[in-house]
Image (tube, helix red, strand yellow):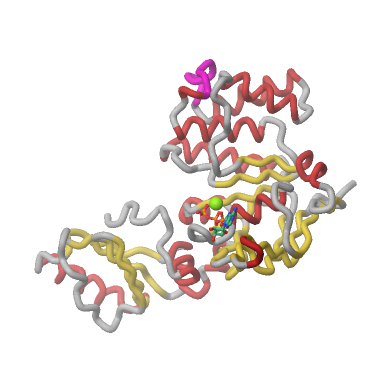
Amino acid sequence: MNDWTFRASGVTKTYDGGKTYANRDISLRVEPGEVFGLLGPNGAGKSTLVKQIIGLLKPTAGSLHLGPHDLVADPDAARQLCSYLPQAPMPIESFKVHEAIRLTGEIRGGDRRQIERRAGELIEALQIEEWRDTLGARLSGGVRRLVGFVMVTVVPGRLVILDEPTNDVDPLRRRLLWDQIRQLGEMGVGVILVTHNVLEAEKSVDRLAVISDGRVVAEGTPSSLKVADRGRLRLQLMLTPGVATPELPSLVLDHTRVGNNLVSVIPEEKAGEGIAWAQQLMSQGIAEEYALAATTLEDAYIRLTGELPADEPEGAAA
Ligand SMILES: Nc1ncnc2c1ncn2[C@@H]1O[C@H](COP(=O)(O)OP(=O)(O)OP(=O)(O)O)[C@@H](O)[C@H]1O
Ligand SMILES: [Mg+2]
């Protein structure tokens, strides 16, 4: 029996004749059955990394292996063994949804009855039955993404690579999609998942790497990445539109403002003072709402990359 562990070792990729370093010395492992998240800001190098795994790009240096296969030396094996949902929409304009799914399943060598059964299950699980007979050209962005997911996982390879699978998908179906991504792990498939949605990733990945400027800046389980935020709380204020950022008391350890959303980190033992400050801002008309909560993976992400995740400022205050 092969061990289908995926290993990237020292992967470096430059563009423009060495002027742009998209990946710098990236080393990672993904075990079979593991859902592994790749997180990082725009331009961090996530898509570049996954394109090298499936043989669309050749690394400038480093190696990529899946089980016994050298994916760089053998791009045919890479295509056969890996299933890949690209970040760009799937080109399925002239196919009906169920045809596109059946065709990709057949190309991957699936048995017709098996394809039909699993396609039916996935279509039902993601609640996209009503588009089964719709032409690709007429699908909305989110449904097209979900159909793409079904196409690449109807006959999954040993490693499934999903580049932003939840983009454009509504919150309910996003949840259904995450369930299906977890299911792939339970089937024993390794999953590499590129996402900007830090909060959803926190709940659904086994391990993750944060990539910034082409490098892995942190790697581990979601809880291991949050260790540095232990003992801290997040105090989130929805400021009154148009007001300047208020003067911050010394209890604020760190803060980021996006629009009217002011996210600050305070020590746990100063929760009372934090609330008093927030209430004072509300009585002065500077803030409209506030929420005090445990720190999440987002706070680690902000600390590591210096950026707010793309899904901020969602559900800012309660
Ligand atoms: N074909 C290319 N030629 C030159 N530079 C490129 C090319 N493709 C990507 N880059 C550059 O490489 C870097 C990494 O890009 P990449 O697409 O891997 O980022 P990403 O992490 O997937 O970002 P996003 O979250 O926006 O999808 C960026 O600086 C980008 O401008
Ligand atoms: Mg990308």
The quadrant where residue 97 appears: top right
Q: Residue furthest bottom?
A: 250
223 sits left or right of 268 in the view: right
Say which quadrant the C terminus sits in.
bottom left
Residue that appears at 65% across and 68% down: 24
Q: In the rendered structure, does residue 60 fall within the stretch colored magenta?
A: no
Residue that appears at 52% across and 56% down: 202
**255 versus 39 height, above or below:** below
Could you say where residue 214 lies in the image, as x and y percent from the top left?
Answer: 59, 65
Q: How many numbered marks does the figure carry?
A: 0
Could you say where residue 136 lies in the image, as x and y percent from the top left?
Answer: 52, 24
**11 versus 133 height, above or below:** below
Q: Residue furthest front?
A: 17
**29 versus 140 height, above or below:** below
264 sits left or right of 201 in the view: left
Residue that appears at 48% across and 65% down: 301
94 sits left or right of 242 in the view: right
Residue that appears at 78% across and 54% down: 5
**96 versus 205 height, above or below:** above
Q: Nearer the viewer, residue 50 or 194?
A: 50
Could you say where residue 109 lies in the image, as x and y percent from the top left?
Answer: 79, 28
The quadrant where residue 86 appears: top right
Q: Residue furthest right?
A: 1
Q: Residue furthest top?
A: 133
Q: Which residues are magenta?
A: 128-136
Could you say where residue 290 lies in the image, as x and y percent from the top left?
Answer: 24, 62
